[in-house]
């Protein structure tokens, strides 16, 4: 069994969009919520919880990436842990930063922290983040978000 730190991220190929377009960050977040709902991970209230989180603190993490997710109170809207990846080639203004990739998270209980930690290890690598921003194929996105097997799990 895979160590929790190197376990595969819960990314359904149907939850990857490589050529999305959004008018603003609210539209981008609503699209993330809709994709998570389409794959059965959340109910229809989750997108609003993602917007509520964004109003309290920006989910922009750098390198052109934002990681929108719900509030602690919204965990009841989550059916199972899941990610979605929406690539916005034209970019989205995110509180003055240009975001080209949104990785939406839905997780029950403490799952957010595990997912955020795993994503941070991947996305803080500038080469990997650049490759993710440039990825145009679903399999490529999934491969980039797969933890390296040879990484030290500590």
Image: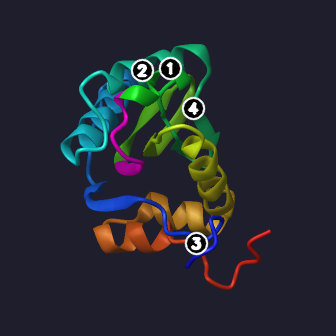
User: Which SS class for mark 1?
Assistant: helix
The residue beneath circle 2 is 49
Left or right relative to 38: residue 32: right
- Residue that appears at 26% across and 45% down: 20
**Colour mapping used in the image:** rainbow
Are the two marked residues, 1 and 2, in contact with CB atoms closer than 8 angstroms? yes
- CA gap, disc 1 and disc 4: 17 Å
**Residue found at the far bottom of this picture:** 150
The residue beneath circle 4 is 59
Are the two marked residues, 4 and 2, in contact with CB atoms closer than 8 angstroms? no
- CA gap, disc 1 and disc 3: 29 Å
Q: Earlier in the sequence, mark 4 or mark 2?
A: 2
- CA gap, disc 3 and disc 4: 21 Å
User: Which SS class for mark 4?
Assistant: loop
Q: Which mark is residue 73?
A: 1
Q: Earlier in the sequence, mark 3 or mark 4?
A: 4
Q: Which mark is residue 147?
A: 3
Q: Dividing the image into 4 quarters, which one contains the C terminus?
A: bottom right
- CA gap, disc 3 and disc 2: 28 Å
Visible in this render: residue 148?
yes
Which stretch did the figure color magenta? 77-87
Indicate the position of residue 119 as horizontal and vertical percent values: 59, 55
């Amino acid at each position: 069994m895979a160590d929790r730190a190197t376990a595969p991220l819960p990314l359904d190929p149907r939850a990857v969009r490589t050529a999305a377009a959004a008018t603003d960050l609210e539209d981008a977040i609503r699209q993330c919520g809709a994709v998570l709902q389409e794959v059965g991970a959340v109910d229809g209230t989750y997108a609003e919880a993602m917007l509520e989180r964004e109003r309290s603190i920006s989910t922009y993490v750098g390198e052109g990436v934002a990681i929108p997710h719900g509030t602690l109170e919204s965990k009841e809207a989550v059916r199972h842990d899941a990610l979605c990846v929406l690539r916005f080639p034209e970019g989205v203004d995110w509180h003055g930063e240009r975001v080209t990739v949104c990785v939406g998270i839905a997780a029950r209980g403490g799952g957010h922290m595990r997912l955020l930690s795993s994503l941070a290890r991947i996305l803080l690598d500038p080469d990997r983040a650049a490759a993710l921003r440039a990825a145009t194929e679903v399999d490529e996105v999934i491969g980039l978000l797969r933890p390296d097997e040879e990484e030290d799990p500590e």
